[in-house]
Image: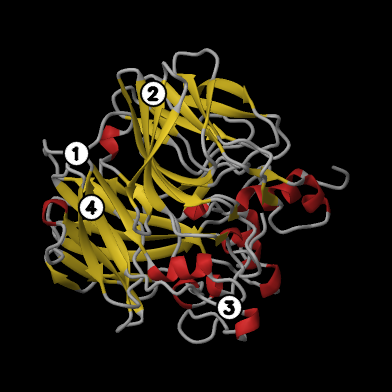
Amino acid sequence: MAGQTRRRVLRGAAVVGAGSVIGALTGAARAKGEGSATMRTTADATPFLEGAFAPVTEELTAFDLPVTGRVPCDLDGRYLRNGPNALGLEDVRAHHWMLGDGMVHGVRLRGGRAEWYRNRWVRSSQVTAKLGETYPGRVPPDDFACNTHVIPYKGRILAMQESGPLPYELDGELNTVRPHDFRSTLTGAFTAHTKYDAAADELHAIAYYPTWDHVRHLMIDRTGRVARTTRVPVADAPMMHDFALTRKYVVIVDVPVTFDPAAAEAGATVPYVWNEQHPMRIGLLPRTGGTTRWFETAPVYYSHTLNAYDQGDTVVIDHTAFPAPFHVAGRGTGGPSATGSPTLDRWTVDLRTGRVRSTRLDDRPQEFPRVNESLVSRRHRYAYTASTAEMWRAYETVDGVPPDEKFTNHLVKHDLSRGSSQLHRFPEGAAVSEPVFVPRPGSRDEDDGYVLAYVHDPGRGATDLVILAAQDFGGHPLARIELPGRVPLGFHGSWVPDA
């Protein structure tokens, strides 16, 4: 690709992933009032820069936050969430939601109190330049303000992105420390979605890059180093935003969204397309090493993994998916475009027959599936998902015309053993973000703990951190913590417990 630098190619590679939609070109809306982006005409509407998506323009710090109800005293740590928050956007028409500079929002809980709230941009070299600051040290290759996920790992907090950038390490007050390369053992691309096997003390990743003819499985061992890298050949440079892990297998999902070199050469903001000629496949790579076995299945846009596990001669993968086709580059709305809402689904891969059975677990619109993280790679019973009306309208809005469906805002707790679910509903305009399950210290039951989520409060024009009792999911929140500003709709987060 003549004239294509690795960083320019990354413009497209970094964008595709989040809501599975995810996040190096950075940018942000010129604000109009309290964090709301400038509105445009209906024909030129940009739903991903307006309303609940609108970037905020300030970094805030607030202490002793107001609380309705009581914060459980055994919640001792930080609730963090990452997402795109464009900074210094000059051309709205050239912007894509998933290209916004990463901003991490966090609330510190301790002793039954909400001690502080902070929001901070991830200080990449581009962000520091825009803020008039000096970037400390050497700028890494494919530098980008990672905007997709934030996780705790061995006493560190890592902001992450897929297809190129190194993670950025943050300190306990969300200041950017440095890029993190796993003790100088990570070369090439990383991922936004790792899988941590608590029993094995291993962190796993699937990394892709648009100029590779393969994807890479990375296993980071208990010392925090990349101990094994396995290259898995694939055609067409597909986008692989997420993957799954069982006790026996690394589950690689090869989707029909592939890199378009011609679009990249022409300067497309997001040079990825839905490729009808690229088969949808599920690959099982043995964790102990060996050859990947592939299984074809009907095409969907595989969005996010809930969890996966081995069951006799089958492998079960629970996930969210959009119907085909899915347009990561969008259709003129400044973000991805879907032909329908995502649902909670299950693949069952039969190792004997070589077939994949697809099952719809819940057909209501929902995304960002989460599980009790201690069960990653093991059989689970409960799942937590979010349905956000404004997000589905933005995904399915074409030419300024929203869909007819009356979407609502709610969190869902699924009991997959019983095939039942509970909803925690929120009012119209109360855009809800990803739910994160936090186990109660000393708990034995899988759902003995709390569910935390940021929820927009339309009455205040700001965001609350809502804490639910997982075993009383439909009941009143245990606590609503008032934040001093908005948390724009974004991507993924984690509970970071104190050591």
Please state which of residues 116 and 313 is positioned toward the viewer in this rendering. Answer: 313
At label 4, the amino acid type is Lys
Judging by the rendered image, the residue that carries numbered circle 2 is 222
Residues at discs 3 and 2 in contact (Cβ within 8 Å): no
Is residue 69 toward the left or the right of residue 53 in the image? left
Judging by the rendered image, the residue that carries numbered circle 1 is 417
Ranked by sequence position, the earlier of labels 3 and 4 is: 3
Residue 276 position, x and y percent, is 66, 44
Please state which of residues 229 and 475 is positioned toward the viewer in this rendering. Answer: 475
Q: Nearer the viewer, mark 2 or mark 4?
A: 4
At label 2, the amino acid type is Arg
At label 3, the amino acid type is Gly
Residue in the picture at 36% in, 81% down: 461
Q: Going by the picture, which residue comes out furthest to the right? A: 2
Residue in the picture at 66% in, 74% down: 92
Residue 328 position, x and y percent, is 61, 55
> Considering only vertical position in the picture, is 435 above or below 2?
below
Q: Which mark is residue 413?
A: 4
Judging by the rendered image, the residue that carries numbered circle 3 is 400
> Considering only vertical position in the picture, is 119 above or below 78?
below
> Mark 3 and mark 2: span between their CA atoms?
50 Å
Residues at discs 3 and 4 in contact (Cβ within 8 Å): no
Is residue 272 toward the left or the right of residue 319 in the image? right
Corner quadrant of residue 327: bottom right
